[in-house]
Every structure is written in structure tokens, then in C-alpha cells.
Image (spheres, rainbow, N blue to C red):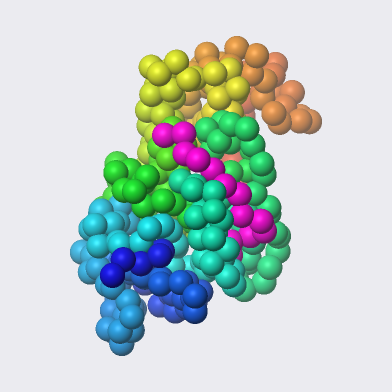
Amino acid sequence: MSADISVIIPTRNRLWSLPKAVESCYSSRLNIEIIVIDDASTDGTGEWLRQQPDLTVVQGEGWGKPWGIARALPLATGTYLRYLDSDDWLNLNANETQFGIAGHESADVVVAGVDVYEDDRLIESVPYPLTDDFIAQQLGEGNGSHYSAFLYNREFVKHIPHRTLFAASTFASRDDRCFILEVALRNPRIAVSPGAALCHRHHKKQRLQFHGGLASIGTNIQELYIYRQILDMLARSGELTPRRRRAATKTLWPLAHRIAYTHPEEARDLVQWICELDPEFAPPESGVLGYFYRYLGFGQTETILRMRRRALSIFRDRVSP
């Protein structure tokens, strides 16, 4: 028998949060199918999953989230589908509310807001911002909510994979960003669910998708290639409007900063592309930093910032006991 909703939960060494994520999915009124991808956990996750008779478990081999989802998706039978990170959870009745709206409005995607938590403390409730251009919103025009807060018609998204360039042994691939942009490019029928569906845990330490060191380079490259591909697709179809160009620059500008930490030449190339996308682009920073960007340019300003970081690092090393 097919389910009303299939929830796919990728996890690796998140036994401390996985039970709460799973529990939040259950419903007394809907048939909820929960598929957990255990991507080679070593913290007892596998043992816990074997004790849960109501779950479908996909055993991964450490190849990362997109690999696991590619194997989990054919198992899903739900009319609607949700992807949920194992350290987040759903608000009470989120599935029921969104499923009812989906059926009533024949929606391809039911969007909703997000409650942001620091550990288990609510710090912000962010409603879904209404928009008349879902593509521009998801490119970066404004807050696009979170893709786990959305409920997707399975038939509509079943051929949209979680793509990645750097899947092996890391979740730092921005596959969720690519997925929601590909969904947007297919012009889905959108319905809005009131309030927040997702409880998104904001960690004081790095989140899964934002590692430091070498993994951060992979994440930055992945995001850059996603935007180059998505904007190229929009250009080929004649849908890369000035509004969407401007929306993309709001994501690409901070990406240029992150790339400049390790690859200043590539960062300058990215800023040149930003100015080609929006010839009227101006750095959004204010104060002294904004002055530097406007009058010294991106390259010289980033050189000054790099020298400042190096000086502060030397100072901290000298004064630390």
C-alpha cells in the first residue's frame, strides 16, 4: 500500500538527534513512511535502527548523502515527499497541515516557514516570505526558507536527483541548494502553509554543510558550479531576467569572499562575473569596509583583509600562553 508521505532522513553519527527527528514525523491521521539512510555510522546508529520495526533503512557505505538518497528514492511510495536532516525535526502536525493543503490546491510544492533553534532553545521564528518569483527567491533574492520545510509531490520531483561533485565521505556538497533550484526551474505549482513546519537546529559549531579547511574549498566550488549551471540553463531558455541576475549576485558576492580566503584570483574572476550579471552591482557593505570595496576594488580590499587576518593570527600566537 502506498504512503501519504515519504520522509527520507540521511544520517551519519547523529544518534543523539535522530530519534527526535524520526519521532516528529509520525502521524495518527496519515500513513507516513520513514526511510533512514545510515551512511556508515559508527556511534550505534545502526543498532538503534535495527530496533525500530516501522522504519525502512538504507545502509550506506560512506559515499555521502546524494549517494544514499539515490538508493532511497526508488523505495519511497508516498504521494508526497520530504527530505529531513537528522539533526532537525518537524513541528507538531506539520505533515498533516501541509498534506491537506497539497491535496486541496493540487500543489507540486507546499512551502512553509522555519523555527530556528540553538541546540534546543528557540531563537527565531521565520515565516515563509511570499514571492511572485520563486526562482529569484531561491537564487538569493531573499529568505527562501529551508528545503526540509517543504513538501514535494513525489511524481514532480522523482527525476530531480541530489547532485554533487564532492560526495565521498562528506555532506559538504550543497546538494540541497542544487535540488531546490532545479525544482524552481520546473515552475512548480506552489501552495503556502501558514507558520513554520521545520525546526532547524543552528549549531554553535560548524554545521554539516559548512566544514572548515579543505572541505570548505569543495563546498565553495560546488556552489559556484551550481550557480553557473543554473544561470546558464535560465539564459538558454530566455528566463534569466534582470531580477534573477540581481538575486544571484546576493549569493555570489559572499561566496566570492569565502573563495578569496584561499583562491584570490578565482575570487576576482567571480566578482567580474557578478558585475557582468548586474552592471549596476554595488558592494552591500557599509562603513570603512564598504568604502574600501568601492574605491580600492575587490582585489586590493581582500589583500588588506588577508594581511589583517595574518597579523591578528601572529598576535594571538604570541600572546597565547
Judged left or right of residue 207, residue 91 is right
Q: Nearer the viewer, residue 99 or 253?
A: 99
Residue at 67%, 58% in the rendered image? 195
Q: Position of residue 283 (x, y in %)?
A: 67, 25
Q: Position of residue 259 (x, y in %)?
A: 47, 34
Seen in the picture, residue 233 relative to 158 is either above or below; the reply is: above
Q: Which residues are magenta?
A: 186-204
Taking the image as drawn, is residue 204 in sight? Answer: no
Residue at 48%, 23% in the rendered image? 270
What secondary structure characterizes most of the magenta part?
strand
Looking at the rendering, which quadrant does residue 243 occupy?
top right
Q: Position of residue 244 (x, y in %)?
A: 55, 25
Residue at 30%, 62% in the rendered image? 77
The residue positioned farthest toward the right in the image shown: 287
Judged left or right of residue 210, residue 161 is left
Judged left or right of residue 37, residue 202 is right
**Is residue 201 part of the magenta span, yes or no?**
yes
Taking the image as drawn, is residue 275 in sight? Answer: yes
Seen in the picture, residue 104 relative to 265 is either above or below; the reply is: below
Q: How many marks?
A: 0
Looking at the rendering, which quadrant does residue 305 occupy?
top right
**Is residue 120 part of the magenta span, yes or no?**
no
